[in-house]
């Protein structure tokens, strides 16, 4: 109301002064200059009224560590660090300096944010959260000012709630904590410097005590000054869950869902190798959506199978292919499946001819055990599985198609891994110290040998194409048990003396 009165009064005063003969030009110029300076100060300082009235606010967290499936080692490390906040009086007896910061690293969706929320609940601390991108603005000084406001708010929130400690969580800290580049000055540097200053200001005598928790999936990009001891004292890896942890996560997310008697959580955990916690939650949610679409009262194993495919490959598309393309794709995928089942028994979970994402068909594999260390034999088996589709097309159609492009990229990456890890005939080498010709020859040698082994496997199980092909074209999906039964039947059949006649028969049919 006062602003409106002032806006209406100023023109009247100016008009009156002009009427009585007073020169108002100096007053107008001074008012314009003062307004401009005020505007610049407000923009550079990031202290607009709107910003002051809108502090970063985070509701009280109810998440606890029992809500996080798996990650037992990471949870143990976090709890140990948090115990320093809880048992602060005992620290003095041992002369322990309390930790100032925890850095959670790991792939996206593994539960880093959940871990931070559970930490606040575990210690009964005030919890304030922000993302790194919130501190980066186009106006100079805004990020640094928000850092100051964040620490101030955390302490005020703890004092207001009569809490002895506060936890500040910054997600995507690599956005503001990236490595500084020589003498170049960036707005990020000013924000980072302010963060370092605030962290250094935390001491054991302060009440409430503040603990910084940050998360990133690019720890290698962080500035050395940020991750040195005394700032982020602990780096805790929150990695992708193993099979046991995946089962725990799935059990947490299916508690409120009506499951059918045929649902096998162990099988789902096995089929979701390399899935993050977020992806596993999405699998259970998508399975419930499939059941809802069918108006089914219970969620069945089939719904979970569809959900895994959707999370892994994307939604099923309406892409219509010709009969010739469908037949070629079917034989291509069967080539992958046959080789996979021979070199890794019980690995094929499903062969599908339903297009999802960019794929016209796919083979879903379910490893019998999680593997994190690979021998040259393991890598060669992966390459042979990748080459199986293209070799099947060669044997049945006399040539390859563009559908093998991604398979070849995967195979070449695996070949480079063999060479780079010193598992090839070149021995232990540094890639940039070997000539391009030598590398090319070694790649070709490895690929040619594995191509011959792949052809030999497919020739041995050639009858599988005839039996599985008809089923796959008709039903579009072939599950692992049915496929293994066809493999066993083909193995029991007498070997054909003339494989070319069988190839010709399949092509003509």
Image (spheres, rainbow, N blue to C red):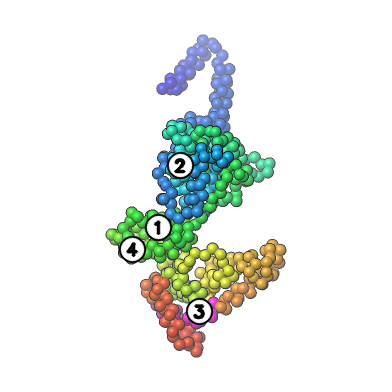
Residue receiving disc 2: 123
Residue receiving disc 4: 300
The reply to whether dot 1 and dot 2 touch (C-beta < 8 Å) is: no
Residue receiving disc 1: 250
Labels 3, 2: front one: 2
Q: Which residues are magenta?
A: 454-470
Question: Does any portion of residue 187 appear in the rendered image?
Answer: no
Labels 1, 4: front one: 1
Q: Find the distance from the CA under tag 1 to the CA under tag 4.
A: 14 Å
Horizontal and vertical percent position of residue 431: 67, 63
Label 3 CA crowd tier, 10 Å (few <14, some 14–19, many 20+): many
Of residues 178 and 156, the one nearer the viewer is 156
Horizontal and vertical percent position of residue 332: 48, 73
Residue receiving disc 3: 458
Q: In the rendered structure, which disc, 3 or 2, sits on the residue that comes first in sequence? A: 2
Q: Find the distance from the CA under tag 2 to the CA under tag 4.
A: 40 Å
The reply to whether dot 2 and dot 4 touch (C-beta < 8 Å) is: no
The reply to whether dot 3 and dot 2 touch (C-beta < 8 Å) is: no
Q: Find the distance from the CA under tag 1 to the CA under tag 2.
A: 27 Å
Q: In the rendered structure, which disc, 2 or 4, sits on the residue that comes first in sequence? A: 2
Residue in the picture at 58% in, 69% down: 375
- The quadrant of the rendering that contains the C terminus is bottom left
Horizontal and vertical percent position of residue 347: 46, 70
- The quadrant of the rendering that contains the N terminus is top left
Residue in the picture at 46% in, 32% down: 159
Q: Find the distance from the CA under tag 3 to the CA under tag 2.
A: 60 Å
Label 1 CA crowd tier, 10 Å (few <14, some 14–19, many 20+): many
Q: Find the distance from the CA under tag 1 to the CA under tag 3.
A: 37 Å
Horizontal and vertical percent position of residue 411: 57, 68
Query: Can you tell which quarter of the image residue 228 is in?
Result: top right
Any mark on residue 79, and which? none
């Amino acid at each position: 109301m006062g602003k409106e009165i002032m806006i209406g009064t100023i023109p009247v005063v100016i008009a009156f002064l002009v009427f009585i003969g007073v020169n108002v030009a100096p007053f107008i110029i001074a008012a314009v200059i003062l307004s401009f300076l005020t505007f610049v100060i407000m923009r550079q300082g990031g202290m607009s009224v709107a910003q002051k009235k809108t502090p970063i606010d985070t509701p009280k967290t109810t998440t606890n560590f029992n809500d996080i499936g798996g990650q037992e080692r990471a949870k143990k490390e976090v709890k140990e660090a948090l115990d320093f906040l809880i048992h602060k009086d005992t620290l003095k007896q041992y002369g322990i300096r309390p930790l100032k910061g925890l850095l959670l690293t790991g792939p996206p969706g593994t539960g880093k944010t959940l871990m931070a929320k559970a930490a606040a609940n575990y210690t009964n601390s005030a919890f304030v959260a922000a993302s790194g991108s919130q501190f980066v603005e186009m106006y100079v000084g805004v990020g640094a000012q928000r850092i100051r406001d964040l620490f101030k708010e955390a302490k005020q929130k703890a004092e207001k709630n009569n809490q002895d400690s506060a936890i500040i969580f910054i997600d995507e800290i690599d956005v503001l904590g990236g490595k500084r580049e020589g003498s170049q000055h960036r707005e990020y540097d000013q924000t980072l410097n302010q963060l370092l200053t605030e962290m250094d200001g935390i001491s054991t005598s302060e009440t409430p005590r503040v603990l910084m928790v940050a998360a990133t999936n690019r720890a290698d990009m962080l500035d050395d000054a940020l991750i040195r001891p005394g700032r982020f004292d602990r780096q805790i890896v929150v990695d992708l869950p193993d099979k046991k942890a995946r089962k725990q996560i799935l059990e947490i997310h299916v508690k409120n869902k009506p499951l059918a008697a045929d649902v096998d959580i162990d099988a789902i955990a096995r089929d979701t190798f390399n899935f993050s916690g977020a992806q596993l939650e999405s699998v259970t949610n998508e399975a419930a959506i499939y059941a809802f679409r069918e108006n089914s009262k219970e969620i069945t194993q089939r719904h979970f199978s569809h959900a895994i495919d959707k999370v892994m490959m994307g939604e099923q598309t309406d892409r219509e292919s010709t009969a010739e393309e469908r037949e070629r794709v079917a034989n291509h995928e069967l080539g992958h499946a046959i080789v996979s089942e021979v070199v890794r028994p019980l690995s094929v979970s499903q062969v599908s001819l339903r297009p999802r994402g960019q794929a016209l068909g796919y083979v879903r594999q379910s490893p019998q055990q999680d593997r994190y260390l690979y021998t040259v034999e393991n890598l060669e088996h992966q390459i042979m599985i990748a080459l199986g589709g293209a070799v099947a097309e060669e044997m049945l159609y006399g040539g390859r198609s563009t559908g093998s492009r991604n398979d070849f990229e995967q195979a070449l990456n695996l070949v480079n891994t063999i060479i780079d890890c010193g598992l090839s005939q070149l021995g232990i080498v540094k890639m940039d110290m070997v000539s391009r010709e030598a590398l090319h020859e070694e790649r070709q040698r490895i690929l040619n040998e594995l191509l011959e082994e792949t052809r030999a496997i497919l020739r041995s199980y050639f009858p599988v194409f005839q039996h599985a092909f008809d089923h796959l074209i008709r039903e579009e999906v072939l599950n692992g048990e049915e496929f293994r039964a066809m493999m066993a039947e083909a193995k029991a059949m007498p070997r054909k003396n003339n494989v070319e006649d069988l190839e010709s028969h399949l092509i003509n049919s």
